[in-house]
Amino acid sequence: MGARPAEIEGLVESALGTTVQSAEATTAGRMAATYLLDLDGGRDRAVCKVGGPSIRTGEVVEPLVVRLVGETTELPVPAVLAAGQFQDATGTRRHWALYEFCDGHTPAEFDALAPAARRRVLRDVGSALGRLHTAHQFERTGGLARADGETVTGDNLRICAHRGLHAPGKGRRVLRRATEAGGVDPQPVLTHGDLFPGNLLVAPDGSVTALLDWGNAHVTTAGYALGRAEMRFVDWFRFPARHRERLRAALRDGYRAERSLPPDYPRFASLYKFLWLVQSGERHLRHTLTSRGRRQLRDHLGSLLSDVTLD
């Protein structure tokens, strides 16, 4: 359940010294209660999110990740205007964050875009992943959690084990056994975690104006991150075969403009996509075990189905 608008008004007034003219609940944000705010005091609009735990660790890390990415890269992410915690009516401590409002539209009907605009989206997505993977490399993979519960800075993130998600680790062990030494790029990198058309804002020409919803960001290998992106932007839709190949080429070209394509990716892209499907199925099955999980699963599936055209 999301915070009441009255609670949000109090948070914004305390953090920014301005008042909220209106607060509209939006359908954006699968895990967080999301509100589009009209503000006084010279600020036009802002987006407020309440909650939004990572599916990998159960912790709210999006404000930390967005601030880290915004401070260390030139990727188009919304600025974090304020963030913190409050106590709701039940006495539960909840995380909230206020983000700048970004221009652009969400390409919910991605397959309805002009072919040239879709290719531009794929190039920009590939470039964004390449820049992110170049800027943030680590010694091990895992989910992201807060180093403590209070300070909101990029330095306050830590890597921890994925909670209940086993497919990526098992898949990497299979790949290590199946390939010769050096055949798989082992470098862990920071990645978005839920990159698909619904988490973008784009201009009419397809250029990406904002990367949204970083709540499931985590550390994985570059090849796996690329495979997941290709699955959600290309294979998820019924494009003609020739157009699929052009979109795949655009994604990879955008990535190569920033860093070399992972050496394992051309060979194992299909396996990475399969592993992502297994992981998603595993996660959805686990969600059916609790009432909260079942509610989140209904919201998640509803959002996914809204992005897929079955004609």
Image (cartoon, grey):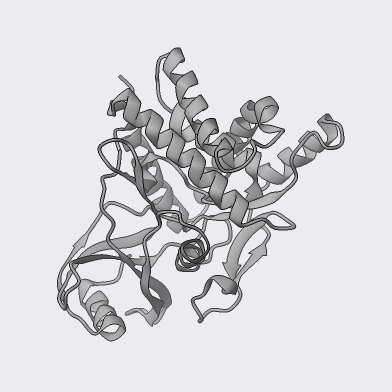
Residue 294 image offset from top left, x and y in percent: 43, 50
Q: x, y percentage for residue 9?
A: 22, 77
Observer able to see residue 309: no
Position of the C terminus by quadrant: top left
Whether residue 36 is visible: yes
Position of residue 106 measured from the top left corner of the image (x, y, whole percent) = 29, 44
The residue furthest right is 181
In-front residue for pair 251/300: 251
Quadrant in which the N terminus appears: bottom left
The answer to which image quadrant residue 130 occupies is top right
Between residue 85 and residue 245, name the one nearer to us.
245
- Tell me the residue at 34%/40% (across/down): 207
At x 59%, y 42%, the residue is: 225
170 relative to 95 in the view: left or right: right
Q: Indicate whether 107 appears above or below 269.
A: below
Please say if 198 is above or below 46: above
Marker count (numbered)? 0
Residue at the spot 25% in from the left edge and 66% down from the top edge: 46
Q: Name the residue located 25 percent from the left edge and 37 percent from the top edge.
A: 204
In the picture, measured across the screen, residue 299 lies left or right of residue 270, that is left
Q: Is residue 173 above or below residue 110?
A: below
Query: Outermost residue, front direction?
Result: 257
Residue closer to the observer: 94 or 39: 39
Residue 248 at x, y percent in the picture: 51, 26
